[in-house]
Amino acid sequence: MRLVVIGGGPAGHRAASTAARLGAEVVLIERDVIGGAANLWDCVPSKAMIATGGLVSRTRRAEALGLGSLTPSIDLAALAGRVRDIETRLAGALTEQLVSQGVRLLRGTGRLLGPHLVEATPADGSQAEKLDADAVVLATGSYPRVPGWAEVDGERVLTTRQAYPPPEIPDHLVVVGSGVTGVEFVHMFRSLGSEVSLIVSRQQVLPQKDPEVAAALEADFLERGVRLLKGARATGLERSGEAKSVTVLCDDERRVEGSHVLFCIGSVPASEGLGLESAGVARTPGGHIPVNHHCQSNVPHIYAAGDLSGRLPLASVAAVQGHKIAEHLMGLHTRQHRHLDYDKAAAAIFTEPEIADVGLAEAEAFALGRKIRVTKVPYASNSRALIDGDPRGFVKLVSDPSTGVVLGGSIVGAHAAELVSIIALAVTANLRVVDLAESLFVHPALAEALAEAAE
């Protein structure tokens, strides 16, 4: 089996690694960095900066824990160095793993010349190479969406890729977009000392999330001095060179002036230039490649994964897609093989407090007219939350009232991203609430709130 993978992000490197381990002859083409731009230039550095901002926030609560007042300062150069070090170490580890498995790495770009022929153009400008392929995995990811009226300069007007870290800590950051990425940046820069205004096009932040979860985050933002402009859409920019300010113009005639503007309005699949037409691969008007439950395109031996596939844009989902693709093309799907159930994917938002959810949401169930049982436990009743001095948030479980099977759950509070894994396991394995209620968790621990919510 000769496999060519275009794109070395979570989906691509996982497909290459698994296929090589199963005996395929694999070539991986990557233009930038093994690990993927989304993983190493978005997910990982943003969470590294959030970790720094979170530590700053915790020091502000030091007196409540019996410590003297602490006033940390931000060393932007040291923070940038830390981010680069994490990126370098992760990319190096992934590269070493692939090489040890016999994967051939080509630095450059790839495109289809036909159904079974890929052209690899080296980044160093040397002659392109043609590769015969029995199967192809397209995993080129996406890039930040920017409105046509916005001139991004990487200094005052930024996309997410230019904010890890930014050229300077903004005095006043205006964030356009109140989805997952937008609210994470609000939290991050507010923690680092910036004044922050958030333009919210709907009537709540996180419009796709449980309203109760969104309300908890909004309350925290307001308490921390974040300005929320609800029901406003950004439509233009005005620049002031002397004052070094940028004003965002909204469709309701509101104006928001700040020192910097950051666009967090989604992403565009990187499907241009892949030669899809040459191989007969279909593409949606939005640029995604439609796939089936095996991640196959309309051309069965050409797969698409990650952001390119139009499924859940999560690194964790992309990695599992890559693994499943490798199993499928190597014939392992004829054995015990479970298809990916995207409705059971856990997701987290690294704000403060953290937010995480998995499975069926309460609001979604009501919209579908489905009977559910909802139980909720506040962090304030958990001994570990009180010990740690951060009792904000709650745990909510959604279950089937007739069978007791756990259907989903939401967590707002410290370490929600870790705790939701327990609910994710319960949802995936069709466990019942009694299985959680009778689990003997550590005491004192935040996980006890899950058991209490399951009673």
Image (tube, rainbow, N blue to C red):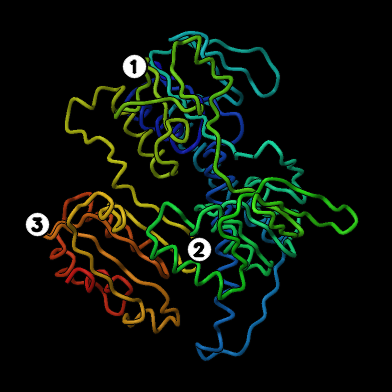
| Disc 3 residue crowd, few under 14, some 14–19, many 20+, Cα 10 Å | few
Which residue is located at x 14 percent, y 70 percent?
438
Q: How far across and how far down the image is residue 348, in percent?
A: 42, 56
Q: Compare marks 1 and 3 and give the one earlier in the sequence.
A: 1
Q: Is residue 106 left or right of residue 372?
A: right
Q: Which of the labelled discs sits on residue 435, or is there none? A: none
Residue 189, position in %: x, y? 64, 63
The amino acid marked with disc number 1 is: Pro
Badge 2 is on which residue?
351
- In this view, the residue in front, 57 or 331, is 57
Q: Is residue 353 left or right of residue 196?
A: left
Residue 286 in the figure: left or right of residue 334: right
> On the rendered image, what quadrant is the C terminus found in?
bottom left
- Cα–Cα span, label 1 and label 2: 40 Å
Instruction: Identify the residue position indicated by label 3 in the image.
Output: 403
Contact check, label 1 and label 3, Cβ < 8 Å: no
Q: Nearer the viewer, residue 196 or 427?
A: 196
Between residue 389 and residue 133, name the one nearer to us.
Answer: 389
**Amino acid under label 3?**
Thr
Q: Is residue 330 above or below residue 157?
A: above
Residue 341: which quarter of the image? top left
* Labels 1, 3: front one: 3
Q: Is residue 350 above or below residue 233?
A: below
User: Is residue 329 placed above or below 145 in the rendered structure?
Assistant: above
Using the rendered view, name the quadrant where residue 452 is placed.
bottom left
Name the residue tied to disc 1. Answer: 300
Instruction: Residue type at mark 2: give it.
Output: Thr
The x, y position of residue 34, in whole percent, is: 54, 36
